Image (cartoon, helix red, strand yellow):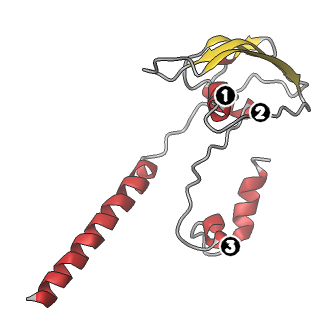
Amino acid sequence: MAFKASKAAKLFNSVHKSQVSWKRIKPYLTEYKSKDTTSNIENKKVSLDISKLSFSYPNGMNDILIDISLNATSGDIIGITGPIASGKSTFGIALLGVYPYSGSIRIDSKELCEYSEYERSQLISYLGHQPHLISDTIYNNIVLGNNGNIDEVIKIMEGFV
């Protein structure tokens, strides 16, 4: 009887682990939808003007960012520093234009929300804190099961650089 109970406990643990894994990968299994890739962006010197930017998450009680202003042009490097939980990542998320913000984020004198999602992705990139890695080697995380051919992955990544 003890042997059967041990097997049942192992089965329960396996099912629980599978459920957790399924919750992680399920969002990636949706059907691919082609997005509009038309763009009116000219390849020239781009200017970024942020004026009195304030931001709070939807259903948030307090503003996380309050009255931030800065100007930058192509080639400028902007460093954002501060203690943990001071709003550095939130600032990056605000620049994506995914959530509503108050104030102004203008790129080439055009408000950020006036650009299409595709155009915004061509102008601004954000890499968050939660990388999605598989429990394997770094090499296998890069090729992601692409038959071990890293050359194809490098060609794809060159398009993002």
- Name the residue rendered at 61%, 66% in the picture: 141
Q: Name the element at disc 2.
A: loop
Kind of residue indicated by mark 1: Phe
Q: Which of pointers 2 and 3 lies earlier in the amino acid sequence?
A: 2
Q: Name the element at disc 3.
A: loop
Q: Which mark is residue 80?
A: 2
Kind of residue indicated by mark 3: Asn
- Name the residue rendered at 60%, 69% in the picture: 146
Kind of residue indicated by mark 2: Ile
- Residue 41: x and y in percent read 78, 24
Mark 2 vs 1: CB contact within 8 A:
yes
Q: Residues within 10 Å of mark 3 (few under 14, many from 20)?
A: few
Q: Residue furthest left?
A: 1
80 or 38: nearer the viewer: 80
Q: Which mark is residue 91?
A: 1
| Disc 3: which residue | 149
From this viewpoint, is residue 30 visible?
Answer: yes
Relative to 72, 140 lies left or right: left
Q: Which of pointers 2 and 1 lies earlier in the amino acid sequence?
A: 2
Mark-to-mark CA distance, 3 and 1: 37 Å
